[in-house]
Amino acid sequence: MFFKLVSRNSKRTGKENGLFFSSLIVSIVAFYIILSLPQQDVMLFLKEMESDAVNRLMGMIPIFYGMTLVILFFLIYYAGKFQMERRRHEFGVYLMMGMRRFKLFVMLLAEDLRSSIVSLVIGLPIAVLLSELISLITARFVGMGVVGHQSSFSLKAVLWTAAGFMLVKLIAFFILSGKISRQEIGSLLVDTPKGSKKQFSPTVYAISLSAGLFCLIAAYAMAIDGMAWRDFINMVFAVILGLLGTFLLFWGLRFPIGYIAKNGGCKRRLHIFNFRQIEENIVHSSGLLAVCSLLILAAMCCFGSGIAIERFYNCSDQKVLDYTFTAYEHDDVQRIREVLAEYKLDNQFSDLFEMKIGNIRSGAPMGTYEYENAFRMDSVMNALSEMPESEDREVLINNLGCATAPYSPFLISAEGYNRLLSLAGKPTVDLQPNEAAVYMGNDFTTENRKEILNSILSDKPKVKILDDEFYLTGEVQSLNVVTDRSISLSFAIVLPDDKFELYTKGDYEIYLDGVLASSATENISLMTAISNMNQKLNETGLIYESYLQNMGRQLFYMVATSYITIYLSIIFIIVANTIIGVQFLMSQQKTNRRYRTLIRLGADYETLYKSAKRQINLYFGIPIAVALMSSIFGVRALFTGLLSSRTSNNIFEMMCVSGAMILLLCVVEFIYIFAVKRSSGRYLLTLIEPLREE
């Protein structure tokens, strides 16, 4: 009989609070996915390419795990508190009929354990399948191929997920059950109304609302302008302003809500009642709503910015080269070719060509550098200074001033660079003996700055290399000259081969760039082909860099931004919405006498349900609206602090992607609101049905 009672109560609780039960399952899924991250194909691959960065990321997982346990505790505590408050009368009846308090405690513990086990039984298989699906999609997306896919199932992740979930559930249960067990039977059988809070004049709330808006505007202005990212003190000050502004804003919302309730002039049924209910809820829980709004804001910023940054890193550079071999001396080039032929690897490359990069040697002895006045581009700098003022113009003047006189820029041989352009399917640079082209790496410029410089190059400005005059022609070049992004040039001059040899005095570095033949990638993915080639090249003793080093860095950013930000956004959105929903349902139960009074005055179920839906729309809508408006500035502020200057031309596109992702989260919000409305409707039926029976 006891176990039947436990089973019946558990099933009833699950049906009555499906929102909370669903939130627990989603939390379990999120737990497992983040804990199983080390078993993902992409992470196993990245560990070989970027072991230090991946190890640091893996070292952060316990921190995320612990932080999530704390957040999940508050979610379970608030939802459990609602369930306990909802069943107060039931507990009082059990005790009045002779059930001992210890037996009541055991019954509640059994119910909690049963619901926890059911959540794990449902959530863990979903988590494993979803993690496997993510691993497959990611492997296919990055070019690893599905054939070489390894199972991402992690028994360790399953055990830690179950252990953490059960631990948090038990701690919350013991705290809540302790509070219930100390109450007398009479207090359990009688509903206790909310206590009153001190009210201030509307002027005080209006001042609070204005101060909150001012603090929020100041905080986001500091973040977007970049001031908050300059040092730790500015960052702390901006965060404090944002937090203070949010709390002041919600505390001051009593002013406009009270004004609307008094002067709304709306003829809809229960209009004043609805606004008074919302006003009272905000009075009692403005701080809680502010915290939930901040959690929703964090979810929107994480989800929106994370997906946008991942998309940017995925399509930021054009892939041309597969390998780069470093030749320290001229004889090394021939030696590299001979070693590749010896190990029968030369036929694995469709192209192997030299990329020569050096500096101007101004008549000095071999191996020494003399930079003073070796290169001057006064005409370009003068043209820039005459252009309309803009941030891009100032950045170009500063960067070109540092890259040229009195310093010597890098020189690139036109033959090797033209071969690179041909492989990329771009027009080559056709230079006359007295002409040169400008090279600027993508990491150091933007499309807008290239356009400014191209407008100047269209007039073929005159420059001086030592005592010789050259004309800059063509457009700014920016293809990566080697596979490894750690070797990048901020500014360089592309010269004809004979001029390159003349000004470098034969003292320059040679990089042997290679492209894999189609036969090497036949029937396998590019990543698999390069991984196989790496194993063979490691036996030769050659020093090389592969495309995987470049792609490994991009993949690391993609994984770090997508997995971590999506994980955090899921946790934040679950906790915030569950707490808001539970808080509203608890408030509705606390004020059940008002609903009973309305029923006695003739209100039917349809009227009460419409009234509750309007209250829910307002109760959810206020924190969501504040978070939605703040997220626009929050995402933009994150882009300012986290991304390099080269992304400034992509900010609009990235903001559009972020906006789409934030709207997707708004759809999730509508689902939560719908679920709370259903729970509210079921509770109103329990109030109105007994009256119909009488």
Image (tube, rainbow, N blue to C red):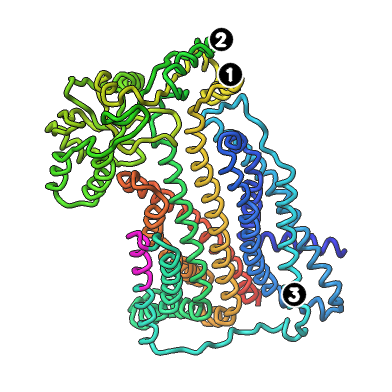
* For the residues bearing labels 1 and 2, Cβ distance under 8 angstroms: yes
Residue 342: image tag? 2
**Three-letter residue code for mark 3:** Glu
Image quadrant holding the C terminus, namely bottom right
Range shown magenta: 215-227
Disc 2 on helix, strand or loop?
helix
Image quadrant holding the N terminus, namely bottom right
Residue 540: image tag? 1
Q: Earlier in the sequence, mark 1 or mark 2?
A: 2
In the image, 82 versus 289, the foreground residue is 289
Residue ID at (43%, 49%): 661
In three-dimensional space, the C-alpha distance between marks 1 and 2, rounded to whole angstroms, equals 9 Å
In the image, 380 versus 33, the foreground residue is 380
Tell me if I can see residue 306 in this picture.
yes
Asked if the stretch drawn in magenta spans residue 221, the answer is yes
Residue 90: image tag? 3
Q: Earlier in the sequence, mark 1 or mark 3?
A: 3
In three-dimensional space, the C-alpha distance between marks 2 and 3, rounded to whole angstroms, equals 85 Å
Q: Is residue 328 left or right of residue 69?
A: left
How many tags in the picture?
3
Residue ID at (40%, 78%): 257
**Three-letter residue code for mark 1:** Thr
Disc 1 on helix, strand or loop?
loop
Q: Where residue 69 appears, x then y in whole percent? A: 66, 60
